Image (cartoon, coloured by chain):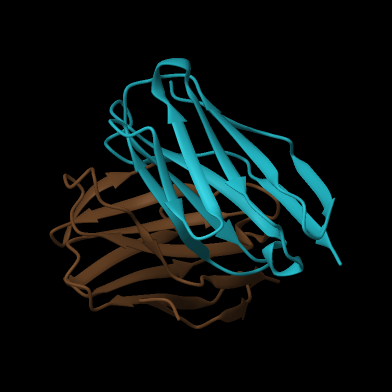
Chain colours: A brown, B cyan
Amino acid sequence: DTEVTQTPKHLVMGMTNKKSLKCEQHMGHRAMYWYKQKAKKPPELMFVYSYEKLSINESVPSRFSPECPNSSLLNLHLHALQPEDSALYLCASSPGQAYTYQPQHFGDGTRLSIL
Amino acid sequence: KQEVTQIPAALSVPEGENLVLNCSFTDSAIYNLQWFRQDPGKGLTSLLLIQSSQREQTSGRLNASLDKSSGRSTLYIAASQPGDSATYLCAVRAHNYGQNFVFGPGTRLSVLP
């Protein structure tokens, strides 16, 4: 069982819909990450939150909007997505972005399909 | 720019064989290297984390080595089992990438009964 919980596991949405992905961890970690993974490709970093503040945005389109309401919760709000945004979205956490000697822990991901 | 490659891209072996997966990175300025396992459609499971000052780490049938100066890491799996079938990814935590991970493309492993 993973210590990083992502919901929903699967999501199908139209290009005009608004939906949100949720990620939760209770390990006391202060850094949380969103990755996007296309089939048979490695994960690509999208956003990093450090102490609930956005520290890295890897030039992600504005139709993806991250939010970190508290130290345990990370959301990814989706609006007007394109078919090429269909992918596995992974959340990860670590003790802190500056704690470079600690591992990252990943959730099981949300499989997103855009119709 | 840090680049990570993995060889081979895919590997198929009979059950019981010992095998080695390779990971190479272009910039030796790393904090550590982490090996992950990913089952189809699932998230990443951390297998081993090896710090830049370490030479190897072991967990059960898995052994990871690191040669930072040459930019190489290997993951050794002893006595492979069908349950080991998965994609194995390595990721380096790079000094020059905002202290974040750069992933390799992975090796797809099939262990045949």
Residue A6 coordinates in the image, percent (x, y): 43, 77
Q: Nearer the viewer, residue A19 or B19?
A: B19
Q: Image height check: is A26 above or below B97?
A: below
Q: Quadrant of residue B39?
A: bottom right
Q: Image height check: is A79 above or below A98?
A: below
Q: Residue at x 48, y 19 (%)?
A: B26
Q: Residue at x 32, y 22 (%)?
A: B29
Q: Is residue A115 shown left or right of residue B60?
A: right
Q: Quadrant of residue B95?
A: top left
Residue A34 coordinates in the image, percent (x, y): 39, 58
Q: Residue at x 81, y 60 (%)?
A: B15
Q: Is residue A86 shown left or right of residue B36?
A: right
Q: Image height check: is B110 above or below B73?
A: below
Q: Is residue B28 visible?
A: yes
Q: Is residue B71 shown left or right of residue B11?
A: left
Extreme residue in the top direction: B69
Extreme residue in the left direction: A51
Q: Quadrant of the C terminus of chain B?
A: bottom right
Q: Quadrant of the N terminus of chain B?
A: top left
Residue A113 coordinates in the image, percent (x, y): 66, 71
Task: Report the number of numbered marks.
Answer: 0
Q: Nearer the viewer, residue B95 or A85?
A: B95
Q: Image height check: is B73 above or below B46?
A: above
Q: Nearer the viewer, residue A52 or A5?
A: A5
Q: Is residue B29 shown left or right of residue B22?
A: left
Q: Is residue A60 visible?
A: no
